Amino acid sequence: SVSDCDMTASPPDCPGVSIFETQVTDIVKATGAPSLQLAISHSDWSQLRVVLTGADGSSSVLWDRGTGIPPAIHSLSVMSGAWMTGRYQLRVEDHVDGTTGSVTSWTVRAN
């Protein structure tokens, strides 16, 4: 689940942060621009910030409290031609109290 901002804490605990990790153990090199397939259920996307940290330690902001619904597939062009082996971390921050959500799936694809 995506942790909600906790306004009952003193001081308030915002943002609520949920971290999901996966490990790619196969030795795989991206042949083109890799992508992230992401499915999150939340009633108000304008409350969320989503960041992916790649196996090389670089971070990409995928969504930052925008309007509407973000795309289900995010291009990771900064990883073009990179080795995909290693740990990936998906960080989801909820910046407003009162609503919760869940990450239903996420997949890193080397293409």
Image (cartoon, helix red, strand yellow):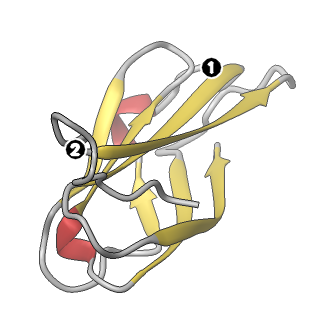
Q: Identify the amino acid type marked 2.
A: Cys
Task: Indicate the position of residue 56 as horizontal and vertical percent values.
Answer: 50, 13
Task: Indicate the position of residue 55 as horizontal and vertical percent values.
Answer: 57, 19
Q: Quadrant of the N terminus?
A: bottom right
Task: Indicate the position of residue 63 as horizontal and vertical percent values.
Answer: 25, 58
Q: Is residue 39 visible?
A: no
Q: Identify the amino acid type marked 1.
A: Trp
| Placement of 110 over or under 107, stated as above or below | above
Residue drawn at (44%, 14%) of the image: 57
| Placement of 48 over or under 51, stated as above or below | below
Task: Indicate the position of residue 74 as horizontal and vertical percent values.
Answer: 41, 59
Residue 22 lies in quadrant:
top right
**Helix, strand or loop at mark 2:** loop
Residue drawn at (82%, 20%) of the image: 27
Q: How many marks overall?
A: 2
Residue drawn at (53%, 64%) of the image: 38
| Placement of 50 over or under 90, stated as above or below | below
Does label 2 or label 1 sit earlier along the sequence?
Answer: 2
The label shown at residue 83 is 1
Residue 30 lies in quadrant:
top right
Outermost residue on the top side: it is 56
The label shown at residue 109 is none
Residue tagged by mark 2? 14
| Placement of 33 over or under 57, stated as above or below | below
Outermost residue on the right side: it is 26
Q: How crowded is mark 1: few (under 14 residues within 10 Å), some or many (20 or more)?
A: some
Q: Is residue 2 visible?
A: yes
**Helix, strand or loop at mark 1:** loop
